[in-house]
Image: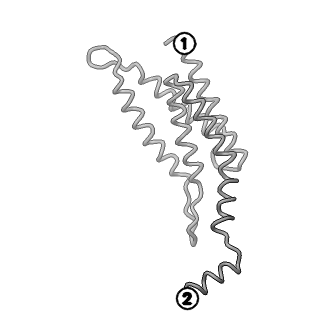
Amino acid sequence: MDHLEILLRLTASVVVGGLIGLDRNLHGKPTGIRTLGLVCLGACVLTLATANLPDGHGHADPAAASRVIQGLVTGIGFLGSGVIIHENGSDRVRGLTTAASIWITAILGILCGMGSWQIAAIALVLVFVLFVCGKPIERTLHRRWLDKPEKEKQAIDLHEE
């Protein structure tokens, strides 16, 4: 792999991570452009560094890259778990979407490192579809099925007694 290809992959990973980070930052979440740009870049660098690791015979060892990717995907989960908060006195958990965005950003970095441009591009588009459409869909579903009008709740309560 030449220097230009390496630069392209690393730059693409920073752009991908930065775009996801920008969305998170604009929505007031604890991660932003720098954090997710670094997560994506780090995953890309690690993938690139292991892509040509030699086996015992001097040939590239694809199993080495696979093991590193497994460790990376698992390890990044610990970083994501740091933003998950359980609110005292309630069943509310916050930060799950941010944790998931850290995880998918690392995976997108891996894809950039592998040069899997089509998968990375489609996945990035789907991430933004979820960011844009997910919350309105959830609100609509909650209003429709979970937020029953008070009279309906009372009727249900009377029926259950």
Q: Position of residue 88 (x, y in %)?
A: 56, 69
Q: Which residue lies furthest to the right in this view?
A: 26
Q: Work out whether residue 138 or residue 28 is closer to the camera in this orientation and state it.
A: 138
Q: What is the number of the mark on residue 102?
A: none
Amino acid tagged 1: His
Q: Can you tell which quarter of the image residue 154 is in?
A: bottom right
What's the CA distance linking mark 2 and mark 1?
A: 73 Å
Q: Which residue is drawn at 46% across and 27% down?
A: 47
Q: Which residue is drawn at 63% across and 66% down?
A: 145
Q: Position of residue 69 (x, y in %)?
A: 42, 33
Q: Which residue is drawn at 63% across and 68% down?
A: 146
> Is disc 1 placed on a helix, strand or loop?
helix
> Is disc 2 placed on a helix, strand or loop?
loop
Label 2 sits on residue: 161
* Relative to 89, residue 128 above or below: above
Left or right: 109 with respect to 20?
left
Q: Where is residue 100 in the image (x, y as percent from the top left)?
A: 55, 46
* Relative to 6, residue 129 above or below: below
Label 1 sits on residue: 3
Would you call the spot at circle 2 few (<14 residues within 10 Å), some (14-19), or many (20 or more)?
A: few
Would you call the spot at circle 1 few (<14 residues within 10 Å), some (14-19), or many (20 or more)?
A: few
- Which of discs 2 and 1 lies nearer the camera? The answer is 2
* Relative to 102, residue 15 above or below: above
Q: Where is residue 70 in the image (x, y as percent from the top left)?
A: 40, 36
Amino acid tagged 2: Glu
Q: Which residue is drawn at 48% across and 42% down?
A: 76
